[in-house]
Amino acid sequence: MKKQILYIDNDIASYVLVSAILDDPNIEITHCRDGLTAIKSFKQYPLFDLIITEIKVPIVNGFTILHEIRRIKPAIPIIAQTASVLNNMKEKCLEAGFNEFLAKPIDVTQFASIVGNCIKNQLVQFDKLS
């Protein structure tokens, strides 16, 4: 069964990189470029296995996305991702309820490891990173 990932980021370069990292037939990525579209997508299809969101996305930020999705599906893993690492952003994200935090620029090995840990019972192997 494919793992469904909702990836939220208005930076196309980040999406292209994440798609390349997670290029596996057992993973399907839905990409949203703003928070409102992401929340609407999740409400229409709450069967996603993992959410990865940039904190600073248009219309609705990552913290609002976190709270809206947790109201619908409290146990879903949600990873915060951002280039804004000043002012204790990692601590703020983890305290708010994100399961993990990733700083940009994306470290491929760390990204694959964290995603793998968040969907532990996956069928996916990140062979090309080994």
Image (cartoon, rainbow, N blue to C red):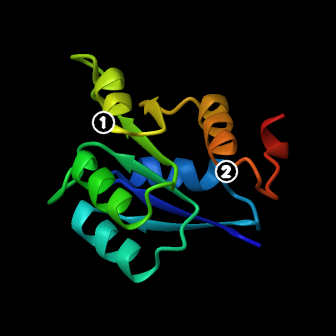
Instruction: Give SS at disc 2.
Output: loop
Question: Circle 1 — which element?
Answer: helix
Are circles 2 and 1 on residues that touch, CB within 8 Å? no
Mark 2 or mark 1: which comes first in sequence? Answer: 1
Say what amino acid the circle numbered 1 marks.
Ala
- Percent from the top left, x then y, of residue 97? 37, 39
**Closest to the observer: 109 or 99?**
99
Task: Give the residue drawn at x 62%, y 44%.
Answer: 118
Residue 7 sits above or below residue 105 on the image: below
Q: Residue 128: image x %, image y %?
A: 81, 43
The residue carrying mark 2 is: 119
Of 111 and 63, the residue lying toward us? 63
Give the answer, above or below, for where 100 lies relative to 64: above
Q: Residue at x 44, y 63 (%)?
A: 73
Vertically, is 37 above or below 83?
below
- Select label 2 or label 1 by which is in front: 1
- The amino acid type found where label 2 is placed reads Ile
Identity of the residue drawn at 32% across and 51% down: 66
Placement of the C terminus among the 4 image quadrants: top right
Can residue 10 be seen by looking at this rendering?
A: no
Left or right: where 98 falls relative to 37: right
How many marks can you see? 2
The dot on residue 96 is 1
Q: Position of residue 105 (x, y in %)?
A: 44, 30
Residue furthest out toward the left: 59
Q: Position of residue 77 (x, y in %)?
A: 52, 49
